[in-house]
Amino acid sequence: MTVLAEDLALDAVANALVDELVTRPWGQETPSVYETGRLTSLAPWLTGHAERLRFLLETQGPDGLWPAPAPGYALVPSLSAVEAVLNVLRAGATGGVARTALTRCAARGLRALAGLLPGLVHIPDMPAIEHITPMLVARINDHLAAFPELAAAPLAPPPGMTGAMLPVVADLLEHGAEPPAKLLHALEIGGPAARGAPSVRPVPCGPGPGTAAASVGASPAATAAWLDPAAPDPAALRYLEECVRPYGGPVPVAAPITHFERGWVLGWLVRAGFPVEAPATLVAEMRAALGPAGAPGGPGLPHDADSSSGLLYTLSLLGSPHPPDLLWNYETDTHFFTWRGENGRSVTTNAHVLEAFGHYLRHTGGGERAARYAATVAKVTSWLCSAQEDDGRWQDRWHVSPYYATFCATLALDGFGGAGAVPAVERAVRWILDTRNTDGSWGVRGGSAEETAYAVQTLSLARGVPAGARRAVREAVASGTAFLRAVPLTSDIDAGRPPLWHDKDLYRPLTIVRAAVLGALRLGGRII
């Protein structure tokens, strides 16, 4: 295949991805063990109950846990799955699935959790993990009295996870107070008080197949926790049915992810040089999503600086710039929050903020706010440089792999950080070169298409390459591109590998990962 023919083939796939942003506006993700377990437990009456149970049985690992890239990541999904299986056994709601298989699954899971919890040192920075873990431990312990044949001792949550917030949230809901917006995504931690809570109202899910659907916190678990099965809210019920439909039972950890997906997919494709033409209606919807507080990842999620920055940067790349002033809602003295009240700091959010301000300033001049835009660029540049690890990489709270954070931070600093960011970019390039696998791939636990795509794109786009490393960069890009050319461009490119993106559970945003791989193939093919 010639380079021209390969470009044409990639262009066709890229344009098909853009079409899917319109035809499948809720987004595409891998199913979640945690969220599927919660739906199994909270809504056994919902379509696909037996399929959800089979999914939990089939995805349990040989060690009794549900597979994850590190032990800490197995905590929440394994607790959720074991509680769900115990709950349906106790209620007799097995959906025709053999009780012996379910009992064996629960016993193996309990033994594995009993071995995992006491020695668990590293707890990943996942949303609401400090509330979800003690909630599920308490529910499992409550079930154990009904199963003396399992001879299982009560579980104990990791140190520091006291569950102190659980009664506070329940009390808020019982007294009709509105919970903080960021907790709506995990409303299931409210327990029975969440059921029909009058202070919580489902949010319409926007265009597409769910025009009559509405969610609580863009979460199947949160929506099921709120929904009263005796008198179900029609829009919330429709939402759950729409979440079930793609996989016939299992559900994703968040839906819709409309704005997050559109910003990342379009931005990455355009930056990689694809001649995509975004439909005018799509661009208009992206602009309309940016209110005074910015945009959420999707309807029902809290507004955040990350999704807002992704849309702003992409609109600017598409020649339809929108002032980034709304991002100042998330500014601190040193950096930007992902959302107000965030417990933590995100490298990738700040990298995307830098791109949003930097691209707008460069391509519009900034007008009367130019000086403040420039000051913001300088602030975020300084913070990102200070957040770099000694070996040259970055790590982030929204992704397992440092290749994603390094990709985001390196390209933002290389594009808009100025001369002061050059040493940080050079260190990042050297770290990527030094960590390539022998088969030409990259990945923290063996090479993956996703992580390889981030490495290839970083090496292909970064201008701040040390003079003595240019030949090594070309060779690394060539080997990485060859690795990616052998990967089928299927819906789930890394099928069979654990997802790497953080939410309540790990997930893989399928269209976003495909866009990353497509971008790497196009850029890598042009360099070699």
Image (cartoon, rainbow, N blue to C red):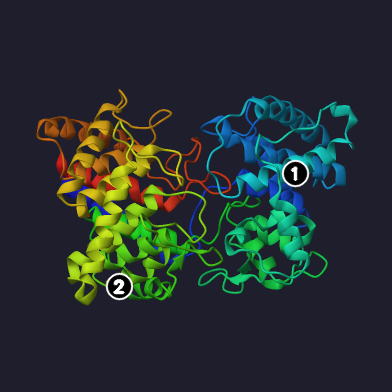
Mark 1 or 2, closer to the camera: 2
Q: Position of residue 520 (x, y in %)?
A: 27, 44
Residue matched to label 1: 84
SS for callout 1: helix
Q: Is residue 494 left or right of residue 3?
A: right
Which comes before the other along the chain, label 1 or label 2? 1
Kind of residue at disc 2: Pro
* Above or below, 478 relative to 290: above
Kind of residue at disc 1: Ala
Q: In percent of the image, x 90 and y 30: which residue is there? A: 148
Residue ranking furthest to the left: 467
Q: In percent of the image, x 65 and y 33: which residue is there? A: 60
Label 2 environment density (alpha carbons within 10 Å; few <14, some 14–19, many ≥20) = some
- Image quadrant occupied by the C terminus: top left
* Above or below, 387 relative to 253: above
Which label sits on residue 323?
A: 2
In this view of the protein, can residue 97 be seen by the observer? Answer: no
- Image quadrant occupied by the N terminus: top left
Residue ranking furthest to the front: 333
Closer to the camera in the image, 523 or 225? 225
Label 1 environment density (alpha carbons within 10 Å; few <14, some 14–19, many ≥20) = many
Q: In percent of the image, x 24 and y 30: which residue is there? A: 433
Q: Position of residue 272 (x, y in %)?
A: 24, 52
Q: What is the total number of numbered labels drawn onto the structure image?
A: 2
Closer to the camera in the image, 241 or 357? 357
Q: Position of residue 487 (x, y in %)?
A: 36, 37
Kindly indicate the quadrant of the structure image that contains residue 484.
top left
In this view of the protein, can residue 122 be seen by the observer? Answer: yes
Q: Position of residue 129 (x, y in %)?
A: 61, 45
Kindly indicate the quadrant of the structure image that contains residue 489.
top left
